[in-house]
Image: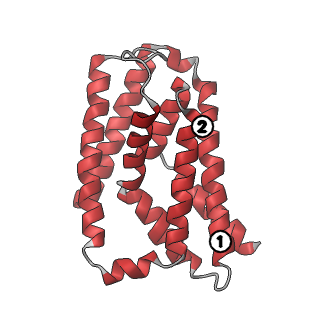
Amino acid sequence: MVAFWAGLRLGLGLIVAIGAQNAFVLRQGLRREHVFAVAFFCAVSDAALIALGVSGFALAAEAAPWLGPGLRWGGVAFLVWYGARAFLAAWRGGSGLVAAGGAASLAATLATIAALTWANPHVWLDTVVLLGAVSAQYPGQGKAFAAGAISASFLFFFALAYGARLLAPIFAQPRAWVVLDLLVGVVMWSIAAELAFG
């Protein structure tokens, strides 16, 4: 149980920070579009990455030195593009809880969250590298540690996705969407800058 709780605490601590993935989940929760699918996709993706990390992906990254830089620069390009999209949405103005162009299809929504999850180097660093490295401190208890971290992902993503509805009255105002889009753009570009120059 010690390893499980350690994994749960560390998993929650890493995932709570607002990033591209969390901002998208929040947006989908506010708009009440494909909420379960988005939360489930994020949690299952995290589970797969955590399992990969605990089972030794960090060793593979050491064996293939190109893997880290490839993830880094691919992530920078994606975050710059996504941030630019958010700034463009803010410039065009908010439209309340109903999107100007209507709801995105489930396929398009899942494609976006897949890119935000799997092309995001921060997700890889947190789930695979960091959690994988910390799990080594619990010899013979890697599965319990991974189970705790995976539980944290499921708890967080479903709480964020469905808890966003409590913010619905605020986001009924178009100006709130402008502010959210501006914040998302700033977060995306600041993460991209950190990856590129940090």
Residue 80 shows in the view: yes
Image quadrant in which you'd find residue 7: bottom right
Q: Is residue 151 depicted above or below 22 in this figure?
A: below
Residue 36: give its label.
2
Between marks 2 and 1 in the image, the one whose residue lies nearer the viewer: 2
Q: On screen, 28 above or below 173?
A: below
| Nearer the observer, 92 or 33 | 33
Specify which label sits upstream in the sequence, 2 or 1: 2
Residue under the point 42% across and 26% down: 104
- The 10 Å Cα crowd at callout 2, few under 14, some 14 to 19, many 20 or more, is some
What residue is rendered at 26% in x and 26% in y?
88
Question: For residue 140, what is the image quadrant?
Answer: bottom right
Disc 1 marks a residue whose amino acid type is Phe
**Helix, strand or loop status at disc 2:** helix
Q: Quadrant of the C terminus?
A: bottom left
In x, y percent, where is residue 175? 41, 16
The percent coordinates of residue 188 (x first, y second) are 33, 44
Closest to the observer, 106 or 58: 106
Residue at left 27%, top 78%? 65
Quadrant of the frame with the N terminus: bottom right
Look at mark 1 in the image and give the residue it sits on: 145
Q: x and y percent of residue 121 in the render?
A: 36, 59
Q: Residue at x 40, y 44 (%)?
A: 20
Residue 116 falls left or right of residue 87: right
Q: Residues within 10 Å of mark 1 (few under 14, many from 20)?
A: many
Alpha carbon separation for disc pair 2 and 1: 26 Å
- The vertical placement of 150 against 63, above or below, is above
